[in-house]
Amino acid sequence: MIEDEQIGSKVNWVEVRREPPELCIVVPCYNEEQVLRQTAAVLSGKVRSLVDTGEIKPSSAVLLVDDGSADGTWSIIEQLHDEDTGLFHGVKFSHNQGHQNAVYAGLMAAYDRGCDAAVSLDADLQDDPDAIDEMVRDYRDGNEIVFGVRNNRDTDSMFKRSTAEAFYTLMSWMGADIIPDHADYRLMSRTAIEALSRYTETNLFLRGIVPSLGFSTSEVFYKRGTRAAGESKYPVSKMLSFAMEGITSFSVKPLRIITMIGMLSIVVGIVMLVYTVVSVCSGNAVTGWGSLMVSMWLLGGLILVSLGVVGEYIGRIYLETKRRPRYIIERMV
Ligand code: UDP
Ligand code: MG
């Protein structure tokens, strides 16, 4: 933030940085007993070094959200809380609700604690915690959201890389403004979290919603490592349902595709009609073929277009039921 200070007729630009935030690091954990201790040690070191350099407040914390794990994750969280009551806090879901809900719950808990900013990152140390330094710096420079963007996909399998690319292309075509190679590693200020809390829909797709909030934002690049221990909690089935959620929660374009196919069918029907008329006039028409084909394509097209129209209304009802905020105010004077 820049403030101008009038000295005589000269204007001096004086940089005013934000106060060091009370930071909350939100970590979704699903069956992460193999890696959680290591992650906790790294994050505790990170918080300590940021407190020592005066970048964040000493009351900053790490919030571990247990997404209904079936292993010893929760008992590790309890132990961590006993060992360092001020630093480690935990929330436990009654059953597995998915990564997005775990992140969201963590952000809301951070807000309720009164934190000034929250960083969400994965429990497996794939999101390089060193990028938090830069995120905090960008926050203090006045950004409300700082996106962590990976600068390489070397640690991904060919399959994950190509499906991710296809997904990002499809999503941007569907009209969701998604940041390529940004997952859920990001810093959000209190103001941004408050704005997010006004999106009351239950099917959450944070990667689409957060960029759509607006605000002053920045990007921080980091090298994504391999999982420190344990296995991926995102099998292909979960990836597919995540992608479906992303598409359907952001766009009613698939409904519009029905109308387009219907119109195409009507065009084919008209071409067939012209062809039939020409063949009848030139005397080499096959009996019955023309009437069958023309009525099939025209009727098929009409049915599809009608379905598309009904779909348009359903799409509107769907978007209305989300009750998304009409606008978000960044600041007032
Ligand atoms: N996760 C979760 N709930 C789930 C699946 C995953 O909270 O149902 C968490 C998981 O513990 C990790 C993060 O989401 O902290 C990302 O999962 P993972 O590393 O397994 O995904 P990948 O990196 O393989 O895409
Ligand atoms: Mg991972």
Image: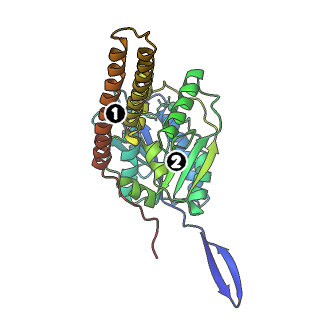
Task: Name the residue: 34% across, 40% down.
Answer: 203
Q: Position of residue 241 (x, y in %)?
A: 39, 29
Does residue 105 appear anywhere in the picture? yes
Q: Secondary structure at mark 2?
A: strand
Q: Is residue 147 above or below residue 295?
A: below
Quickly name the residue at label 1.
305
Q: Nearer the viewer, residue 8 or 165?
A: 165
Residue type at tag 1: Val
Which of label 1 and label 2 is nearer to you?
1
Q: Quadrant of residue 128?
A: top right
Task: Name the residue: 46% across, 65% down.
Answer: 330
Does residue 31 appear anywhere in the picture? no
Q: Quadrant of residue 292?
A: top left
The N terminus is located in which quarter?
A: bottom right
Task: Name the residue: 37% across, 44% down.
Answer: 90
Asked if labels 2 and 1 touch by Cβ distance under 8 angstroms, the answer is no
Q: Secondary structure at mark 1?
A: helix
Q: Nearer the viewer, residue 277 or 264?
A: 277
Mark toward the start of the polypeptide (1 vs 2): 2
Q: Position of residue 232 (x, y in %)?
A: 48, 26
Task: Name the residue: 32% across, 21% down.
Answer: 295
Disc sitting over residue 186 in the figure:
2
Residue type at tag 2: Arg
Tag 1: Cα neighbours inside 10 Å, few (<14), some, or many (≥20)? many
Q: Nearer the viewer, residue 198 or 139?
A: 198
